[in-house]
Image (cartoon, grey):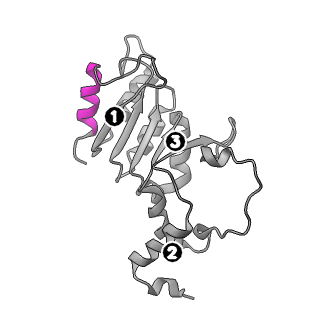
Amino acid sequence: QSSSLFSLPPELRLEIYSMVLPRLESEVEIVQLNMDSMRVVTKAGSEKRRPRDLTKVNILATCLAVHNEALDHLYTKATFKFGSTKVLYLFLRHIGNHGRQLLTGIDVVCGNRDDALAFALLATCEKLTRIVIRCPRPKLLLSGAPIWTVNSAACLLSLTGIDTVDFQPTAPGLRHLGQSEPDVAIVCQALTRPR
């Protein structure tokens, strides 16, 4: 049975979704639900201390057609921020292929063993145009680095089609892979290649 909602023009349906879906900030931090959990939530959602409002309808769960149309509203307007590539990887798995096709911006702290997996999965995000990289070391690869860092760097450099590549510190005052480092030019050149 078809809903009369779908007889409306797509622009009007998208406007309706923007009114009933939660309003996201321009930057949304994603965290693990618990340290040993494979589930991820927004940081704001993890800090809520009041009971859930059961009077609100979860429009994304009403039907598959609404779900697919409304996802565009969620994933294209915000930059999602991750404290580690493990959380990025869990998020990318959670949103599935359809969500990954809509993702446009991320901000991620990298520099651990999960980098290669996360960057390999991030390469499937065809609309990704913005990335902020927070690497706590001054070079992409250090002399005598473990093999996983080489694999991570290769997966990062395999990303393409990104318009805006930025490097920020993991914390104020800490040395990091920043704009003045020679490796940054290589990373920017690789990531901004056309798809």
> Which residue is labeled 3 in the image?
89
Spatial separation of the CA atoms under disc 3 and disc 1: 20 Å
Return the x and y of residue 118 as percentages of the image width and height.
47, 39
Residue 195 vertical placement versus 118 (above, below): below
Rendered location of residue 56, percent (x, y)? 67, 68
- Looking at the image, do the residues carrying marks 3 and 1 touch, with CB atoms under 8 Å apart? no
* 165 vs 171: above or below: below
Q: Is residue 145 left or right of residue 87?
A: left
**Along the line of sight, which residue is nearer the eye, 86 or 69?**
69
**SS state under label 1:** strand
Of pointers 3 and 1, the one earlier in the residue sequence: 3
Task: Name the residue at 33% across, 40% down.
Answer: 159
Q: Which residue is mark 1?
A: 166
**In terms of sequence position, does the residue under pointer 2 or pointer 3 come before the other?**
2
- Residue farthest to the top? 144
Question: Which residue does the image show at 44% across and 44% down from the upper left?
Answer: 121
| Tag 1: amino acid | Asp
Identify the amino acid type marked 3: Tyr
Q: Quadrant of the N terminus?
A: bottom right
Q: Is residue 188 magenta?
A: yes
Query: Would you name the residue on which mark 2 appears?
Result: 65
Q: Find the distance from the CA under tag 2 to the CA under tag 3.
A: 26 Å
Report the span colored magenta.
181-191
Q: Amino acid at mark 2?
A: Ala
Main secondary-structure element of the magenta-colored stretch: helix
Which comes sooner in the sequence, label 1 or label 2? 2
Residue 95, how many percent across, how many down?
A: 53, 54
Q: Secondary structure at mark 3?
A: helix
Residue neighbourhood size for the residue with mark 1, other residues' Cα within 10 Å, grouped as few (<14), some (14–19), many (≥20): some
Q: Secondary structure at mark 2?
A: helix
Residue 159 in the figure: left or right of residue 53: left
Nearer to us in this view, 22 or 181: 22
